[in-house]
Amino acid sequence: MRISPVAGALALLLIAAVAPAASPATPNAPSANDAPGAPIEIGSRLELLIDDYLIESLSGGARLEMHHPVPQEIALVHDAPWEGSGTGYHSVFQDGDRYRMYYKAWQLKVEDGKMISNTHPLFTCYAESRDGIHWEKPNLGLVEFQGSKDNNIVLASGKHGNVQIDAGHIAMFKDENPDCPAESLYKAFVLSRGEKGLLAFHSPDGIHWEAMHDSPVITKGAFDSQNLAFWDPVREEYRAYVRFFDNGRRDILTATSKDFIEWTEPVPLAYPGAPADALYTNQIKPYYRAPHLLIGFPTRYTDRGWSPSMRKLPEPDHREQRAAAVQRYGTAVTEALLMTSRDGRTFHRWGDAFLRPGPQRPGTWNYGHQYIGWHVIETASPLPGAANELSLFATEGYWTGNRDELRRYTLRTDGFVSASAPLSGGELVTKPLKFSGKALHLNFSTSAAGSVQVEIQKADGTPIPGYTLADCDETFGDELARTVTWKEKPDLSELAGQSVRLRFLLKDADVFAFQFK
């Protein structure tokens, strides 16, 4: 079946199922390697307190708290004649001393009660940056548009070698497989315009792309979204995440491969305890500092229908114009969620929004708003001497006028979720763990009056002499890797390899992550 840009856009706006919010305390599935009751082997890896997988109990005022990205400047304006108001599906990653960005370029508008989507073909465009903050669109000289190759287009829809492609539904990445040949250092999924499915593409330089195979490598799915894949360094396989319909509701499938060509049968993701939300993009990738954790930012689509509040949202006249074509074009709203997995298929998904539509202003609170790019990157803080932070990017101004924009947001490094407690105090106790290393390091933040203390216990909960709460020096401040000490001694060598529990006492404090090393 041929998938056209118009058909893809129409499919994106089917009726969404709406369900109540989920509790953030939903347990995540254990790894298949974890035996019931056995201590969790964490070695010296960084562990984010992003779910309750390592947590036995929370008491007092302690809780898991999701944190939200902070809006910064507009990073990129999509106003070139070959771009437009439907530009999106950004792939963003660091590549050595520069950052790369790929995205769909599309003009989308409504006139006289009809959607106009064929102003120009769908393109894949490219931008790059030296710091991940300031972005440029280089003139690549590859694809002709209106008689000139003076543009940043990487791929154009239509005939490409032996395949027909839709260059709007793309996801590019740098392959970190240590056995990857040089000619395939960069890979991508590109939507086929011939046989339904996803084509495997590769490139030696991230600029010149060719199909790896003449037929789609994944054919099960809906695909009218950003379907993606990556090398999973922990499981040593490629993993794909693609869109599909589950009894009329938008959802996500996953599949695996050893060579990027032959894939397993895609299967649906599981979200124990989460609402049956309609999900578009998934934005899943191993977190670069803790690759055993997969973190995703799926887009939640909600059709709120007409109401007094809907008519109070920005750009009401244009909203009415979109609704004249199809009501949902005017009454659908989107935002980004947060979900995590330790096995690639079972995800802990927060019901509350990770990136809300935010303050009402032109270009916000509409369909297509807050689609987060794939994935986070590390950038410098604007505060001199402060630690690096995470940057992520989200669209606004979608299908209004002749352009849309990409706004940068920032988040503390590892700062998606924290174990948090007020000044009155709270405690977190882990499940039994086995670690390797000599010292315990915390990514944490306290108030001037707050603190964190850690007690190390035997697996049965008995405090270990010398590492009790009374022995632990109060830790306060705000750092990404502070060493915890017990009577000014940090050395934990004698406990390495033993089954232990950690007991955190928090007072007006947040702990985002910990690591033994």
Image (cartoon, helix red, strand yellow):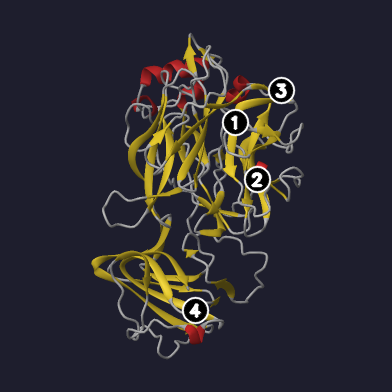
In this figure, which residue is indicated by the disc labeled 2?
A: 182
Q: Position of residue 94 (x, y in %)?
A: 48, 46
Q: Residues within 10 Å of mark 2 (few under 14, many from 20)?
A: few
Taking 45 as reference, is 396 left or right?
A: left
Q: Nearer the viewer, residue 250 or 154?
A: 154
Residue 461 visible: no
Q: CA distance from mark 3 to mark 4?
A: 56 Å
The numbered mark, 4 or 1, whose residue comes first in the sequence reads 1
Cα distance in 3D space between marks 4 and 1:
46 Å
Q: Which residue is mark 4?
A: 501
Position in image of residue 163 (x %, y %): 72, 26
Decide: is 373 above or below 416.
above
* Mark 1 vs 2: CB contact within 8 A: no
Q: Which residue is mark 1?
A: 169
> For numbered disc 2, what is the local secondary structure?
helix
Q: How many residues crowd mark 3 within 10 Å: few (<14), some (14–19), many (20+)?
A: few
Looking at the image, tell me whether mark 3 or mark 2 is earlier in sequence order: 3
Name which residue type carries label 4.
Arg
Label 4 neighbour load within 10 Å: few <14, some 14-19, many 20+: many
- Picture quadrant of residue 306: top left
Residue 510: x and y in percent read 35, 64
Residue drawn at (33%, 41%) of the image? 72
**Closer to the camera: disc 3 or disc 4?**
3
